[in-house]
Amino acid sequence: MDEITFRTLDFQYILDRIEIMTPYGHIYKDKMRAFIEGEEEELKKELDEVERFKNLVKDEKFTMGIRDLLINIKDLRNSIRRAQRGGVLTDVELFELKNFFMSIRRLKNILDEKEKEIAIDYNIEPLEELEALLDPENTSLPTFYIYDAYSEELKNIRQEVKCLQSEIDKKRDTLKKKVEEELNIRINTDGTTAIPKDKKDLVEKLKDYPYLVYLGENYMTIKYALKPTDEIDILNKKIQILKGKEEKEEEHIREKLSSEIKKQAKRIWKNIAGIGRLDLVIGKADLALKINGIKPNITYDHVLIIKNGRHPKVEVLLRAKSFQFKPISVQLKRGVTCITGANMGGKTVSLKLIGLLTAMAQHGLLVPAEEMTLGLNNFIRTSIEDSQSIDRGLSAFGGEIRAVKQAIDLSDNRGLILIDELAKGTNPEEGYAISKAIVEYLLEKESITVVTTHYDNVANTEGVLHLQVVGLSNADFEELENKIIHSHEDPIEIINSYMDYGLIQVDRNAQVPKDAINIARIMGLDLNIIELAEKNLKGKAGYIGKARIRSKAY
């Protein structure tokens, strides 16, 4: 698809409904592409995989177990690359890697339980050596620090620091009690005390007191802190020296751990790729459940068959208004198919459904239909709605012709071309002639072309398949009109509720249904205008005949 086709077919709506849980799944989702002619077997494998997972995600225990693990997986790519370049990882990075390795092991256990249902190897392989390396005390806890178990020297340093700190604490307690007894005051656990300013004698005494040091004051009190003794100062200096040694030893351990991560980087990347792939497949399977999707049949023949297909976006919109989408069925092959029907009859919906379901299938997605058979296309191009380009100064008709030309330039290749209301942006006489000519030109091309038109006699060319939207042809207009008159609902919504988007094959010479005047009548347009319109329509019969003669002469 080009950008216009992507936007026109609402393919972004489909992509947005594929829920991804990991940063690695997003990588795979962003790289999603269509399988094209020659890649039928690869697509079949992909669709088989999604179908299997569609059945698996129905199992709530399986789904919750997978989701709980995947949703907490972080993006570790920068850390791994840094280790590969010889960088030293931080404690936070090592903590995240430890949790990642634990998640891989648990994920593998869940997948192994469904080994028979999962035929694909996702290369999710527990990294037991690395997990043990980052959990040397075998706690299996989601925490990390530089454990004593990494180094006997580190263990001894920390033990010595602990002993010195204990000695300091004892000396501080002794000093605290001494000061409290001598001054008859209370020292806080943090070694500070606040003396009221009105105790002037005590304040004066403290100016030369050797075991308290001035910290600050406010309008009521003066704050003091215990002043370390020379013995305590010496012990603190010893601790600082040991802390420096501890930091060096810890950094040395981080270097060793980072080096081991570097050695196993290839295996880590394989797991990352497997998790990303698994995440995307689960997202596709979850979407299939939401839209009640089925696996399309992939064939080598250039055909497109849809049985009771539903447009997922339109279906959701109708359901929100308590309406039901009426499924659409088509059988298309190389050449041209014309879809006719009255305005508001659903021709554009049919066209978009054909394009969207084709794009979904070729992107490895299950489709909302009862059945679908598809031969792979090398391109999909659309000219739907107003494709004018304001920045290039093109009119609506100019933009339409540009889009059609781009599609025609590809038509010798195997693809799908969808054109809505061809030549609607110009006068009816020329519009008819251009529409007829383009249909005749595309008839012998390699592509499957579907054209909607409001012109009579465009679909009567030999070899063109003529489909007609059921629209309101089966509706009881008297009942519809009464409902609009007596209801407070939007008349357009009421008309939509009667609309049948289904397609039926008709004789190639069948005329386009004239529902527009009926719709105008039930919408309340002045009856005098309705009568004039019907009169003008009867007078138009001769014009159609002339148009047909001019087309043949052309």
Image (spheres, rainbow, N blue to C red):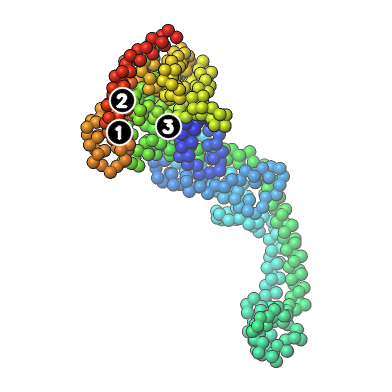
Q: Which numbered mark, 2 or 3, is in the foreground of this view?
A: 2
Image spot of residue 466 (x, y percent): 36, 18
Of the image marks 1 and 3, the number of the one nearer the N terminus: 3
Asked which secondary structure carries label 1, the reply is loop
Image spot of residue 213 (x, y percent): 73, 80
Q: Is residue 328 left or right of residue 334?
A: left
What residue is drawn where x is 24% and y is 31%? 477
Disc 2 marks which amino acid? Answer: Ala
Q: Is residue 40 visible?
A: no
Image spot of residue 450 (x, y percent): 42, 21
Residue furthest to the bottom = 201
Few, some or many residues within 10 Å of mark 3 (<14, 14–19, 20+): many
Image spot of residue 322 (x, y percent): 31, 41
What residue is drawn where x is 61% and y is 45%? 76
Mark 2 vs 3: CB contact within 8 A: no
Disc 1 from disc 2: Cα separation: 11 Å
What residue is drawn where x is 54% and y is 27%? 394
Q: Is residue 162 visible?
A: yes
Q: How many discs appear? A: 3
Asked which secondary structure carries label 2, the reply is helix
Report which residue position mark 2 lands on.
533
Report which residue position mark 3 lands on.
366
Disc 2 from disc 3: Cα separation: 47 Å
Mark 1 vs 3: CB contact within 8 A: no
Disc 1 from disc 3: Cα separation: 45 Å
Residue 195 sits above or below residue 505 on the image: below
Choose top left, top right, bottom left or bottom right for residue 56.
top left
Disc 3 marks which amino acid? Answer: Leu
Q: Along the line of sight, which residue is nearer the eye, 224 or 445?
A: 445
Report which residue position mark 1 lands on.
525
Q: Along the line of sight, which residue is nearer the eye, 306 or 328?
A: 328
